[in-house]
């Protein structure tokens, strides 16, 4: 596996690589993960995965493809590593697909290796935002990759519409650890909630959102929705994550009069207790291929309110959860009010969420699908 990002980390791609690599290692596969440093030592073992970190210049802001000229040192070292280690691996998996990934793919293919790449949100978004970006992406995929993994059916269809043959594209969701992320025992929930949120009443309906705090994650829509909801309802909001929009969101919360009804908790390294002490999970992204936080919430048995976009919309519709349009705080508020008033509906959606996570997104379901793509010449 190769990635241009520093690893480990708390972002969606970092968590995907962690769960996938350790899941493969747990099942007896030899896994080598090559990432950029810093942080971390040049070499270490992590959950059965041999991690190698290569020096590279810090990356410029998004889009990722603009980084090529800024990381030539990393690319040279990565190419050299792939050649030196060619006897130690059979398949190269690169994430995300970008120009750096094409360089790695061409090197690996020159040594006779199968190459699989994963399209993530930046690549998909660029095809919508920049004229010609879609053509460049598809040309890159045709040149360098034996198979392409899409996170959702929407991205799979985008790639097919762009001209990739069906045999080269396969939709595989992110895996989630359903043992780590599991519902709290009913007897434990009151103590968990009181310990974490002593300032809120026992009957509070706690709505959790977790993401990088940037405008297109829709956190402002959630704040406006809660502010407009029936004040007699004990709705409370927990915002997990950090990012450039945090100060603006805190000012918005103050201007909306949310006051003690909201808690910004910043970056959280262990989200499992936070999910277990919440009642509803909300994520209102303008675009999202597939959210790891959403999958973790589903595995924990939380009812969800989401925007009907990408794989996130697929998950919400699969359990009959409220799905809303991006930016629609009125519909979001109505959905939250309905859930706040109906604990039986929350329980039913939570049960369906857990069932979906176990049946569609669990590590034991997803990892074998990746293995199949790694081994087969035709993933379709």
Image: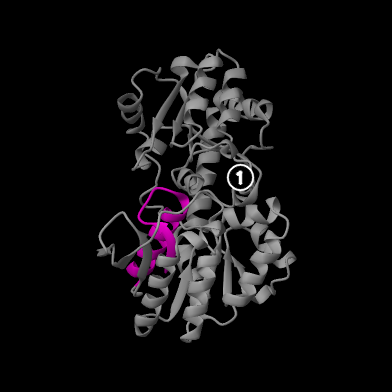
Q: Which type of secondary structure does the marked residue at label 1 adopt?
A: helix
Identify the coloring: one colour
Q: Quadrant of the N terminus?
A: bottom left
Residue 78, given in percent of the width and then of the height, sits at 40, 71
Q: Does 86 sit left or right of 230 as displayed? A: left
Foreground: 137 or 305?
137
Q: Is residue 2 magenta?
A: yes
Residue 96, given in percent of the width and then of the height, sits at 51, 61
Foreground: 31 or 339?
31
For the point 55% across and 32% down, the residue is: 219
Foreground: 155 or 2?
2
Q: Pointer 1: what residue? A: 316
Residue 123, given in percent of the width and then of the height, sits at 60, 57
**Residue 229 visible to the viewer:** no
Q: Does 236 sit left or right of 45 as displayed? A: right
Q: Does 263 sit left or right of 45 as displayed? A: right
Q: Is residue 276 magenta?
A: no
Q: Quadrant of the C terminus?
A: bottom right
Query: Against 125, is 172 above or below?
Result: below
Query: Against 120, is 278 above or below?
Result: above
For the point 36% across and 74% down, the residue is: 29
For the point 61% across and 24% down, the residue is: 225
Query: Against 33, is 251 above or below?
Result: above
Query: Against 288, is 326 above or below?
Result: above
Instruction: Classify mark 1: residues with Cα within 10 Å, few (<14), some (14-19) or many (20+).
Output: many
Count of numbered badges drawn on the protein: 1
Residue 94, given in percent of the width and then of the height, sits at 48, 68
Q: Does 33 sit left or right of 212 as displayed? A: left
**Residue 198 visible to the viewer:** yes
* Span highlighted in magenta in the image: 1-27
Foreground: 65 or 311?
65
């Amino acid at each position: 596996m190769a990635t241009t990002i520093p690893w480990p980390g708390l972002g969606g791609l970092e968590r995907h690589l962690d769960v996938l690599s350790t899941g493969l290692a747990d099942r007896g596969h030899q896994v080598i993960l090559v990432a950029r440093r810093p942080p971390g030592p040049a070499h270490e073992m992590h959950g059965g995965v041999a991690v190698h970190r290569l020096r590279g210049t810090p990356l410029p802001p998004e889009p990722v493809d603009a980084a090529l000229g800024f990381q030539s040192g990393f690319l040279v070292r990565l190419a050299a590593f792939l050649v030196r280690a060619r006897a130690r691996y059979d398949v190269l998996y690169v994430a995300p697909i970008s120009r750096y990934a094409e360089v790695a793919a061409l090197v690996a293919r020159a040594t006779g290796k199968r190459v699989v790449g994963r399209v993530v949100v930046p690549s998909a978004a660029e095809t919508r935002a920049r004229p010609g970006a879609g053509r460049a992406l598809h040309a890159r995929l045709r040149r360098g990759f034996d198979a392409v993994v899409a996170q959702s059916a929407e991205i799979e269809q985008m790639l097919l519409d762009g001209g990739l043959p069906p045999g080269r594209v396969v939709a595989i969701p992110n895996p989630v650890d359903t043992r780590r992320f599991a519902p709290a025992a009913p007897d434990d929930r009151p103590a968990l909630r009181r310990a974490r949120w002593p300032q809120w009443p026992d009957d509070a309906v706690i709505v959790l959102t977790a993401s990088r705090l940037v405008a297109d994650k829709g956190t402002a829509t959630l704040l406006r929705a809660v502010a407009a909801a029936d004040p007699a309802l004990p709705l409370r909001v927990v915002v997990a994550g950090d990012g450039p929009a945090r100060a603006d969101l805190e000012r918005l919360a103050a201007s909306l009069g949310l006051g003690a009804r909201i808690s910004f908790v910043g970056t959280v390294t262990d989200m499992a207790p936070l999910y277990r002490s919440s009642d509803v999970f909300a994520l209102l992204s303008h675009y999202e291929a597939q959210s790891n936080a959403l999958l973790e919430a589903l595995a924990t048995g939380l009812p969800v309110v989401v925007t009907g976009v990408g794989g996130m919309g697929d998950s919400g519709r699969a359990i009959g959860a409220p799905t809303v349009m991006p930016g629609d705080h009125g519909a979001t508020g109505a959905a939250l009010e309905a859930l706040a008033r109906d604990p039986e509906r929350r329980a039913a959606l939570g049960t369906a969420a857990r069932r979906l996570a176990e049946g569609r997104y669990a590590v034991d379901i997803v990892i074998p699908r990746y293995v199949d793509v790694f081994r087969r010449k035709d993933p379709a």
